[in-house]
Image (spheres, rainbow, N blue to C red):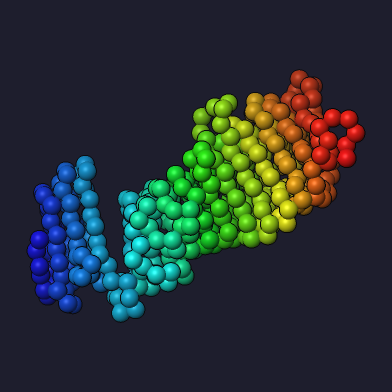
Amino acid sequence: TVNFSGGINVSSMTFETDYTLLPGEGATLFAQETVLSNGSSLTLGDGDHRFSGFESLVTGGENSSLTVYMKTDASSALQNLYVYGALRLRASSQSGSWMLGGASLHMMAGSTMVFGSDAGTSIGAGQTVIAEGSLNVYAQNVSDSNTYLWNLEGGENVSTGDTLTFNGTSNPTVAGNITYAGNIVSGAQTGSTVTFTGNIQAESFKVAHYYGRVHMADNELEVNKLWVGAGGGYDNSLYGALDLDSGNVTTAGQVRLAELGHGVLNVNQGSSLTVTGSNDTHSTSASFLLAHWAYSGELNLRGGSLTALQTSMHLSWDGTGIFNAASGTADLQGMDFWASGSGSFRGSFLLGGATFGDAR
């Protein structure tokens, strides 16, 4: 452990074992390059000695780590925080108004944000995280009451080739707004749930079939593509499920289920789904397709509102599509039960609660 005061300004620093640097009041640290050898750790500050800023290009060997204690009060000089690798947030001692001292947090392309079991129940109210490319957000055994309050924006260089991924082993709520020009892939491990209550604008939102359930509630989802049961390898035993719950308004240019696995989309009481696309061709490029590949695609209308006036609902292609209208309102241009070019009919329409005989 090294205590220092004043300023340190060097071209490079190399650490071959574990070190802790503790700054005095007003101390500064700058290094053009910081190198961590294999198995070494560098800790800058502690709970009583915090940095107002640290600028360096940090490279680390295998099993190396860097921990920085930053000032986050109004007097902090911190303006921008750039993360190129993984950032694990431990916010248990922070209040709901935690804002990194007003600094902007930039998660660079290919980086990861990890929320562990010691994260607080509310993180980042009023804070904006800027994803400068593809970003993975992972919740690791956090409590069910954990809520991400920060807003997330895609940087100016984000394109449709970038992906924002939400996953993990918990049941968190993402309450901040998301604006991202790329694709969002979300889910949770089997038996887990991710709930979104902030507004979302993106190129696409995909519920991966190898995860559990995703919920949308009291928010607006606006995307060009909404896919449920997508991504990953082929696995006939897994599925992805998306629940549109009360207060949700979803608008999508294209809705597709069962891309690479079973897909279930529930339009529940108080929610609405509008398909705006106009591709009504009998093909896999149709704007509204329930069962693309050889899996089941199931759309359940359970008291919500479903609208598709510029394209028919294509119930199947290689898979088996089911439209189950238990209750609610559906305003459709039409329904196409015909599957792929073989001429078979694999789609089915269930009206009301009847499973046989007259619909009711």
Q: Is residue 257 visible?
A: yes
For residue 174, above or below residue 38: below
Which residue is outermost to the bottom?
A: 75
Question: In the image, what residue occupies the spot 52% across and 35% down?
Answer: 210
Question: In the image, what residue occupies the spot 18% across and 51% down?
Answer: 41
| Residue 356 rendering spot, x and y as whole percentages | 84, 30
* Quarter occupied by residue 80: bottom left
| Residue 354 rendering spot, x and y as whole percentages | 83, 35
Q: Is residue 276 visible?
A: no
Question: In the image, what residue occupies the spot 30% across and 76% down?
Answer: 76
Question: In the image, what residue occupies the spot 28% across and 71% down?
Answer: 71
User: Which quadrant does the N terminus fall into?
Assistant: bottom left
Q: Is residue 326 left or right of residue 143?
A: right
Q: Is residue 156 left or right of residue 25?
A: right
* Quarter occupied by residue 209: top right
Which residue is outermost to the top?
A: 342
Of 42 and 82, nearer the camera is: 42
For residue 343, above or below residue 242: above
